[in-house]
């Protein structure tokens, strides 16, 4: 039975992604989501207390997965410079993966962003990204590879630049591919940090 309940939750979330993508910004009802999932209203309310709760759960699940991937990249890197470059490249690579791109578009649609609690969840993810970047910059400051780094302040600027690059890629307004943009942004950040190539 626990497995069935978990499977229901996944089916509802996956159906919601499809419905949001197909709606192209138009409102999506719980009925539409359940029809796409092939489940009953009872199944929905076993899992979620409201549509807003569903949308926040979807946002949480995807953001947790992304942050785990980025932390893994940073932890496995041979140097702070490699960690920073890997994090930037990993984040922007999402925009070049069609499946993940569609999920981001669903979770940044008007329907999703109007969900009660969305702003708080988004703020939490931004703060977590900033914290990971600050850890990388602090490691570079400590080992001398980022001699000009002010980890707390600079992490905010790097995250803001990364966020803007991500939005440009998603909007299709960037003048370069995701990989090219990642390389440019990494180069800019390393120069600003006074990166020492011999560390």
Image (cartoon, rainbow, N blue to C red):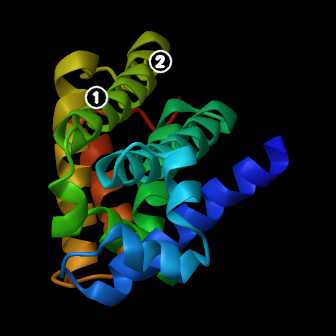
For this orientation, the residue located farthest to the top is 142
- First of labels 2, 1 by sequence position: 1
> Which residue was labeled with disc 2?
139
| Residue density around tag 1, few if under 14, some if 14–19, many if 20 or more, within 10 Å | some
Looking at the image, residue 54 sits to the left or right of residue 188; the answer is right
Label 2–label 1 contact, CB within 8 A: no
| Residue drawn 46% across the image and 67% down it | 94
Q: 129 or 20: nearer the eye? A: 20
For the residue labelled by badge 1, is the local secondary structure a helix, a strand or a loop? Answer: helix
| Residue drawn 32% across the image and 42% down it | 190
Location of the N terminus (image quadrant): top right
| Residue density around tag 2, few if under 14, some if 14–19, many if 20 or more, within 10 Å | some
Residue 15 position, x and y percent, is 52, 74
Q: CA distance from mark 2 to mark 1?
A: 18 Å
For the residue labelled by badge 2, is the local secondary structure a helix, a strand or a loop? Answer: helix
Is residue 10 positioned above or below 76 on the image? below
Residue 158, label in figure: none
Say whether residue 66 is visible. Answer: no
Looking at the image, residue 148 sits to the left or right of residue 178; the answer is left
Looking at the image, residue 115 sits to the left or right of residue 18; the answer is left
Residue 104 position, x and y percent, is 37, 67
Say whether residue 41 is visible. Answer: yes
| Residue drawn 14% across the image and 55% down it | 114
Residue 84 position, x and y percent, is 44, 41
> Which residue was labeled with disc 1?
127
Q: 185 or 164: nearer the eye? A: 164
| Residue drawn 18% across the image and 82% down it | 26
> Which image quarter: residue 146?
top left
Residue 144 position, x and y percent, is 43, 17
Number of callouts: 2
Is residue 35 positioned above or below 63 on the image? below
């Amino acid at each position: 039975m626990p497995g069935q309940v978990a499977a229901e939750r996944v089916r509802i979330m996956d159906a919601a992604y499809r419905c949001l993508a197909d709606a192209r910004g138009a409102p999506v009802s719980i009925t539409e989501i359940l029809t796409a999932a092939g489940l009953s209203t009872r199944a929905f309310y076993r899992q979620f207390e409201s549509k807003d709760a569903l949308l926040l759960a979807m946002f949480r699940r995807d953001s947790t997965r992304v942050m785990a991937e980025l932390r893994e990249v940073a932890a496995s890197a041979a140097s702070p410079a490699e960690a920073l470059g890997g994090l930037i490249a990993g984040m922007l690579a999402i925009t070049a993966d069609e499946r993940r791109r569609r999920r981001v578009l669903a979770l940044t649609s008007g329907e999703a962003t109007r969900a009660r609690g969305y702003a708080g969840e988004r703020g939490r993810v931004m703060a977590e990204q900033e914290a990971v970047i600050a850890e990388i910059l602090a490691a570079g400051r400590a080992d001398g590879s980022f001699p000009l780094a002010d980890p707390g302040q600079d992490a905010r600027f790097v995250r803001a630049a990364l966020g803007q690059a991500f939005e440009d890629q998603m909007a299709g307004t960037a003048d370069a591919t995701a990989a090219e943009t990642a390389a440019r942004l990494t180069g800019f950040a390393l120069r600003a940090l006074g990166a020492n190539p011999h560390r």
